[in-house]
């Protein structure tokens, strides 16, 4: 079974994401902080992390994951999407950056594509157009 590591400091959001992931037949692994996510990442096929978290934010978590595994797809979710954050996330090796709020299909499609990329053994992601300010609900980095 494909496993998604979900990282968010808000337990309500974490439960909601877990229901979405489970409804697709994927196993949800939960972490409420960056350090907790790092301790569980070895069991994950894909990581979905919030950007804004106390202590270690999503971008710092992405960097720590890349130090250990350069092929694990990481999807960064943020309500504070900007061109600069998108650029930082992409340069740090994020698979996707989704701006909140987004459609559930955008999240599940991004996860499904990340599973496919991981299965193919890809170690880098194709370059994506850097948006100025993605429209609310649109996945940054997608066409």
Image (spheres, helix red, strand yellow):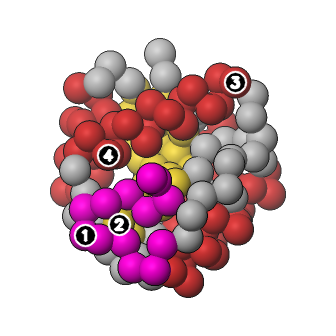
- Residue 1 to residue 105: above or below: above
Task: From the image, give the main secondary structure of the stretch colored magenta.
Answer: loop
Residue with the mark numbered 3? 120
Does dot 2 land on a helix, a strand or a loop? Answer: strand
Does dot 3 land on a helix, a strand or a loop? Answer: helix
- Residue 45 to residue 133: above or below: above
- Residue 126 relative to residue 34: left or right: right
Q: CA distance from mark 2 to mark 4?
A: 10 Å
Residue with the mark numbered 2? 99
Report the span colored magenta. Answer: 131-143
Residue with the mark numbered 4? 106
Q: Are marks 2 and 1 in contact (CB under 8 Å)?
A: yes
| Image location of residue 49, percent across then percent down | 46, 57
How crowded pointer 1 is (Cα within 10 Å; few <14, some 14-19, many 20+) is rated as some
Q: Are marks 2 and 4 in contact (CB under 8 Å)?
A: no
Q: Which label's residue is closer to the chain start, 2 or 1?
A: 2
Taking the spot 57% from the left edge, 64% from the top edge, the residue there is 129
How crowded pointer 3 is (Cα within 10 Å; few <14, some 14-19, many 20+) is rated as few
Front label number (2 vs 1): 1
Q: Specify whether residue 81 is in view.
A: yes
- Residue 139 to residue 131: above or below: above
Q: Nearer the viewer, residue 132 or 94?
A: 132
Taking the spot 50% from the left edge, 59% from the top edge, the residue there is 141
Residue with the mark numbered 1? 136
Q: CA distance from mark 2 to mark 3?
A: 26 Å
Asked where in the image residue 35 lies, by quadrant, the reply is bottom right
């Amino acid at each position: 079974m494909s496993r998604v590591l979900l990282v968010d400091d808000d337990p309500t959001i974490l439960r909601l994401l877990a229901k979405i992931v489970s409804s697709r037949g994927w196993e949800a692994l939960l972490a409420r902080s960056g350090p907790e996510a790092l301790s569980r990442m070895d069991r994950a096929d894909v990581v979905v992390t919030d950007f804004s978290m106390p202590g270690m934010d999503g971008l710092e978590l992405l960097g720590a994951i890349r130090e250990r595994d350069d092929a694990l797809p990481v999807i960064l979710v943020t309500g504070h999407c900007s061109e600069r954050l998108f650029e930082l996330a992409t340069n740090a090796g994020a698979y996707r950056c989704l701006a909140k709020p987004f459609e559930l299909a955008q999240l599940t499609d991004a996860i499904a594509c990340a599973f496919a990329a991981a299965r193919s053994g890809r170690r880098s992601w194709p370059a994506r157009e850097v948006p100025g300010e993605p429209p609310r609900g649109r996945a940054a980095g997608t066409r």
